[in-house]
Image (tube, rainbow, N blue to C red):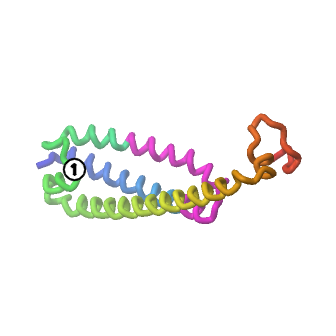
Amino acid sequence: MLDEETSDRLISYFKRLLDFYREFLEFETKKHGYLEQDRLDQLDACMKREQAFVLKARGLEQERAAIMQNTPTPSARFREIIPLFPSGCRQQIETLYENLSSVLVKLKETNRKSNLLTEQKLRQTSVVLDRLKGHTELKKIYGRKPTDPPAGLFSKKI
């Protein structure tokens, strides 16, 4: 059985974890929309924010490990420690756990869809680039090194 302090810390942690992953799901859903719409300008900004989410997830994982040290089974999964909660708060932790599981499933599915869409777009780009290899005029324009001066096709401000 978990003591009251550890139970309270875990419930508080679950609430923060649920809030974090809901926010992360919302972000991933927006990012997937930008990917579908080919909004590369928005995708670039998403990369920085995604890195912040990953860092925060790592911090939350470290916090989980520290809290779990106070349980009888520190290496147990969350599902396995639910029966250890006092009966008065067991329903609350079960609800939090189910909500968290639901959000994580949605997050994984959104991420899977984004990865598939990205792979599809990369394959399409690869096919176009392969077709361009035989065109010498296009190679003059697109095959330049970044240090070469522009060929006059685009403004220097771009």
Q: Is residue 2 left or right of residue 48?
A: left
Front position in the image: 29 or 12 = 29
Q: Quadrant of residue 120?
A: bottom right
Front position in the image: 76 or 140 = 140
Q: Position of residue 4 (x, y in %)?
A: 18, 47
Q: Is residue 15 left or right of residue 31?
A: left
Q: Position of residue 6 (x, y in %)?
A: 21, 45
Which residue shows up at 14% across the image and 56% down it?
A: 83
Front position in the image: 101 or 144 = 144
> Magenta stretch containing residue 33, yes or no?
yes
Q: Position of residue 117 (x, y in %)?
A: 52, 62
Q: Secondary structure at mark 1?
A: loop
Which residue shows up at 17% across the image and 59% down it?
A: 88
What is the residue that sits farthest to the top in this orientation?
147
Magenta span: chief secondary structure:
helix
What is the residue that sits farthest to the right in this orientation?
152
Name the amino acid, label 1. Arg
Q: Position of residue 80 (x, y in %)?
A: 17, 53
Q: Which residues are magenta?
A: 31-59
Which residue shows up at 57% across the image and 64% down it?
A: 33
Q: Which residue is mark 1?
A: 77
